[in-house]
Amino acid sequence: MDVVDQMKQLASDAKQAANIMAGLSSTIKNDLLCHMADALEANAELLQQENKKDLQAARANDLSAAMIDRLVLNDERIKSMADGLREVAGLPDPVGEVTGMWRRPNGIQVGRMRIPLGVIGIIFESRPNVTADAAGLCLKSGNTVVLRGGSEAIHSNTAIGTILKAQLSSMGLPEAALQVVATTDRQAVTELLKLDEEIDLIIPRGGEGLIRFVSENSRIPVIKHYKGVCHTFVDADADTDMATQICINAKVQRPGVCNAMETLLIHKDIAETFVPHIARAMAQHKVELRGCPVTCSLAPNAVAATEADWDKEYLDLILAVRVVDSLDEAIDHIRRHTSLHTEVIITNSYANSQQFVRAVNSSVIMVNASSRFSDGNQLGLGAEIGISTTKLHSFGPMGLEDLTTRKFVVFGDGQIRP
């Protein structure tokens, strides 16, 4: 079969399997995920052997340090994948939950029941852990999943998919419930995006270019997340030690991910002391500062920021820094430059924190905590399927509940409409 027929067959098989997966009990789904977790850890050596092939190709192709970091599968990340599956297994099953039951004057009872979306397509770059994370969330929520990773992770993704599919087979469940596209032919993505009768939702995970391509070419509804320009605002009365620790963590711990801080806003009343302090702290971690004129006057190691820097997702040890006159100016800056991902305020003022929470409408707002917590696992959702910056149908990190929809259920005792 050519790639067109391959994608049609793959999606058709996933749709047929969806009817079976939607009816599984929570116990069966939980057992499946636990078996998958055990299998990943048991095959850690194989996974790392396959991952080395991808890493060698990535270095040969001069991929960025951030991309290579996302690609790595080491013992810690394999264990994290397995633990993520076990955590999802331990979460309440949203499928079948009936909410909001009410009685009408004629006596009928009306409620809403959570049901799976059906077939979910995930198109992603690097990060082979997405294969396991997405499989766990989609299968637990009663869906089937079609995964198309980037060519840079083809060996890693295929190995993970093979291990996970074997657990479906061992439990007598359809392997087609989990499909990993094995071809690196870019036409596969284009063809998948046409299959609106088989696939119910597309979730792209990767760079802005990939997500815009998917959004512009898909006949299927798309959950979008273009980039993560995350802001941290240090208020006038912030605890400077706390602010320093949060800012270093948000920028340095893992700069190549979407919840890393990209812009630091500092209140003018503490700029004279805090700007030189945070500049020295960032310099110790080899962070390049791109600052406004006030920042540059107080931090000799900063270079002048351009207007483009305020909208930049660096995914690197680079930080834009601006001194603002007030909380209102910080909020205004965020509104103009936000990517709707995550925004942080560091303050000891309850009133200011509440104003920030109410006025800034990104998908995650944090008070006195690192933006690195903007993650489904860290927020208690289990391994996330992605972070949506689209306000329909889900907003923010997406967990199990976000992979379901609701149908109306009506209970009567013979009522007819007059």
Image: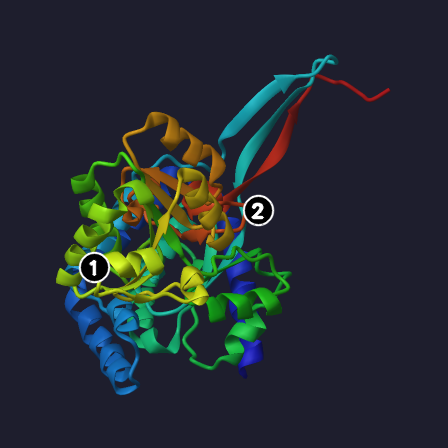
The picture quadrant where one finds residue 69 is bottom left
Q: Which of the image's four quarters has the C terminus?
A: top right
Is residue 172 visible in the rendered image? The answer is no
Relative image position of residue 263 (x, y in whole percent): 35, 55
Q: Relative to 116, is 223 above or below?
A: below
Residue position for label 2 = 392
Q: Answer with mark 2 or mark 1, whichever residue precedes in sequence.
A: 1
Crowding at dot 1, Cα within 10 Å, few <14 / some 14-19 / many 20+, comes out as: some
The picture quadrant where one finds residue 150 is bottom left
Crowding at dot 2, Cα within 10 Å, few <14 / some 14-19 / many 20+, comes out as: few
Question: From the viewer's perspective, is 270 left or right of 1?
Answer: left
Task: Look at the numbered disc 1 and give the secondary structure of its residue.
Answer: helix
Question: From the viewer's perspective, is 160 left or right of 121?
Answer: left
Relative image position of residue 188 (x, y in whole percent): 51, 76
Which residue is drawn at the image coordinates 49% and 41% (left, top)? 361
Which residue is drawn at the image coordinates 25% and 36% (left, top)? 238
Residue type at mark 2 is Leu
Q: State yes or no: discs 2 and 1 in contact (Cβ < 8 Å).
A: no
Relative image position of residue 114 (x, y in whole percent): 53, 36
Which residue is drawn at the image coordinates 22% and 82% (left, top)? 56
Q: Relative to 351, is 95 above or below?
A: below
Q: How is the image coloured?
A: rainbow
The one of 296 and 95 positioned closer to us in this rendering: 296
Q: Relative to 78, is 57 above or below?
A: below
Q: CA distance from mark 2 to mark 1?
A: 31 Å
The one of 372 and 343 positioned closer to us in this rendering: 343
Relative image position of residue 142 (x, y in whole percent): 46, 46
Residue position for label 1 = 77
Which residue is drawn at the image coordinates 30% and 79% (left, top)? 63
Is residue 109 visible in the rendered image? The answer is yes
Q: Looking at this rendering, what residue extends furthest in the bottom direction?
A: 60
